[in-house]
Image: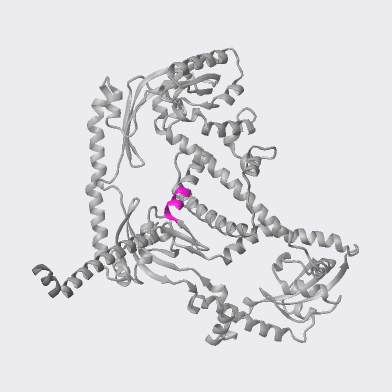
Amino acid sequence: MATLEKMRHHGVFLLVVVGVALLAFIVGDFLNSSASIVNAERMVVAKIDGDKISAEDYMAAIDQLTEVYKIELGTANISDELNDQIRQSVWETLVREKVLATETEKAGMQVSQKELSDLILGDNVHPIISSRRAFFNPQTNAFDPAVLAQFITMLDSEDAAQLPQEQLRTYKLYWTFWESTVKNARLEDKYTALLQRSFVANDLEVKNAYNGDKTQVDVAYVAKPYFAVPDSLVSVSDRDIKKLYQQKQEQFAREASCDVKYVAFPIKPSETDYAEVEEWINRLKEEFSTTDEIADVTNSNSDTPYKGQNLAKNDVPEDLRDFAFAGKKNDVVGPLFADDTYKMARIVETGISLPDSVKLRFVDVAEASMPETQVVADSLAALLRNKGDFAAMQQRYRGGEAWAREIELDREVAEQAFTTPVNGVFQQKSMGGIRIFQVVERGAVVPKVKLAVLERKVIPSSRTQAQIFNAAKQFAAGCANIEEFEAKATEQNIEVLTANRLNINATKLRDVKNSRQVVRWAFEAEDGAVSDVFECDNQQIVAAVSRLVEKGYSPIDDVKAMLEVEARNDKKAELIKADFAGKSFDELVAAGLSVDTLRGVNFNMQYAGAVGNEPALFALAPLAEVGALSQPQKGNMGVFEFVVLDKTELPADFDENEERVMLTERMRNSVPYLAIEALKKVADIQDERYKVF
């Protein structure tokens, strides 16, 4: 009872304590949830018509297209420039697919699995598939449906388990990319076909199109260009420019951008670094020249390993060729220095005569166990020796055929490939199975050597890199704003570089590799701010924001120079027109104006001769009377007057149906491009890749 009495006396206090505890729990849970929501939102790289694209999906698409490029180009390395192209291509594809999906779903359009299968394996394979060299028959060098079918079957067959997981992953990414591309291309074809059917030229358009081509004239014209009138004769006020700006404002719409100035401190070797490498190679010369373990000495010291390969003349670096093929065994040359590299070479063996290259064909075999694989491999090898059908083997097993130089092959393969006679067969085992080789042809026999090369490229030492970083750090630390940044650069005679109108998703500053971090900083910084030091590839960068531009319209000051030229030309046109007034064509020519003749001018023309693009001339000339002098006309390049010399009417009668068909076809041909661009223009596209990348 006493306990209950105490609780009654302290009831309000207990309620407050419990309430605070509950509030803390709710707020804590809310904050954790909010943090999760914020983090999830930050991982969204785009919103297209409300549909979110995650960073994970975007990166997966980039990874997929990268693997596709590697297979298509036959390379394991992708350049920075190509990486940028891949990122942009993925973005454009995502936007295209999303805006198209929104419209096709409304229309109930889809591509069925049966339809897709027909486009891939049917009688009319889509050109996207049939143009892939991965599905070409090496014998015919043309697309082969059997090769394609074999590839698709392999992806889900028991043989796939024998492939390295990374290789299988790459093949699947490659195939799903092209399958998806075909599906989306088909969907787009359907959508644009639907739109094209809705385009039919009306009667007025048909009549105008015919009339536009019907009358053709030959004209003589005189012109006075705007530049022939001194600028001092006209004055352009701020009011004139403002008026023109208001008329053309929509032309000046712009995205957010940033102008950056930066200085670079190249990370390059010091004189001490060069001296140390020179001392190192001289210290090794005696051992390199006399050792019986040349492979061990070379491979434990050199940037270039010694593989014991037989090298033809073209396989040897140009600066060592004369030495390699004129010297004798154990001769040594060097140390030599070129391209920041110290090197010396030793002839390990000479007097070798072997083909410069061989043509090999191969078949890969991988059964459930190695004994089973060996049985099949021996059987196929026997068939090859007896001129078996190699193309048939390729349909059952993966294979290929190509010329190869010795240095392009693994040493074990090369040793057999270059000593086995034509039609000879040999095998190589690996963890994945057995590869059977057959020598098809041998190139010309040439002299070869074994050459050990001990070399080391001079690179900046950690001590040198620290000195360069400290110099950049001191530069950045002494700059509170862009004015001090520029002053200090001038004082230290350091070139200030510029990267203007950077987009928020720009991957780098001009050609500075790995400089996306600087772009990201610039858009988060304030106008005039100076950065800390950024290491970008082989240089230290200090940047300053010279200008931040928000999304909207270019301010009048930015386009003032262009508008001033246009406004001045308008006023010059009035002066020229006044000068032309009351003068005959001959008088204008006598006054020194340029004169020229145009043949076959009609209303539908867009460009002609030296006059270029002058719509006013093309519109008025066909309507003028022969021999009549026109009024002065303001054109793009100046003011002109013309006289029609001759007028011709098309002899063909007006065929409304034929004209309608041609005009409708012309209109429909523009639909595939214009339709997607129109969808993108009206779509709500929020590009937020900058949040993550």
Q: Position of residue 631 (x, y in %)?
A: 77, 82
Furthest toward the left, the residue is 2
Q: Is residue 61 magenta?
A: yes
Could you say which is closer to the camera, residue 617 or residue 121?
121
Furthest toward the front, the residue is 1
Could you say which is closer to the camera, residue 214 or residue 673?
673
Q: Quadrant of the N terminus?
A: bottom left
Q: Is residue 66 left or right of residue 538?
A: right
Q: Quadrant of the C terminus?
A: bottom left
Dominant secondary structure (helix, strand or loop) of the stretch shown in magenta? helix
Decide if residue 230 is in sight here. no
Q: Is residue 104 left or right of residue 517?
A: right
| Image: 161 above or below 88 | above
Q: Position of residue 20 (x, y in %)?
A: 22, 70
| Image: 156 above or below 81 | above
Q: Is residue 392 left or right of residue 531?
A: right
In the picture, residue 681 is in which quadrant? bottom right
| Image: 280 above or below 62 | above
Q: Position of residue 81 (x, y in %)?
A: 46, 50
> Which stretch did the figure color magenta?
54-62
Decide if residue 564 is in sight here. yes
Instruction: Give the residue drawn at x 23%, y 70%.
Output: 19
| Visual colour scheme | one colour
Could you say which is closer to the camera, residue 517 or residue 143?
143
Q: Position of residue 84 (x, y in %)?
A: 46, 52
Instruction: Give the residue drawn at x 52%, y 23%.
Output: 362
Instruction: Give the residue drawn at x 85%, y 67%.
Output: 214
